[in-house]
Image (spheres, grey):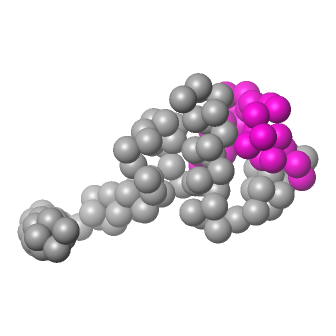
Amino acid sequence: MLHEEFFANRLASLRIKKGVSARDMSLSIGQSANYINKIEGRKSYPSMTVFFHICEYLGITPKTFFDEDVPNPAIINELQDHFNGLDADSQSLFFGLVRKMSLMCKTCK
């Protein structure tokens, strides 16, 4: 997939997962109402500064924007923030729970 196509598709996917319209997102990052539509339509691409604003708005890092193996990076980032706020014992308990859920899901497939 071309880089331009990937960028446009990834932006659209993440925006839709956030549940916002292209117009609302455009205005929220300080751009014209059709700005995100132009990017998703491959007619325009953001500057680095605006790209950072897009990532901040989506609640993700620039690195996770480009990681297509992470379908919903905003959830991962929020989960990591909560995890980091736990004490060591709670982190261990949480990790054990996630590992058990993961194993259960593998047997369900």
Q: Is residue 45 above or below residue 40?
A: above
Task: From the viewer's perspective, tell me whether residue 99 is left or right of residue 56.
Answer: left
Q: Main secondary structure of the magenta part?
A: helix
Q: Is residue 47 above or below residue 77?
A: above
Quadrant assignment for the N terminus: top right
- In the rendered image, residue 82, in percent from the top left (x then y), is placed at 33, 66
Give the residue furthest to the front. Answer: 109
Q: Is residue 97 magenta?
A: no
Q: Quadrant of residue 95?
A: bottom left
Quadrant assignment for the C terminus: bottom left
Residue 101 visible to an observer of this rendering: no
Residue sitting at x 58%, y 35%: 6
Q: Which residues are magenta?
A: 33-57
Residue sitting at x 49%, y 36%: 66
Q: Quadrant of residue 46?
A: top right
- In the rendered image, residue 12, in percent from the top left (x then y), is placed at 65, 50
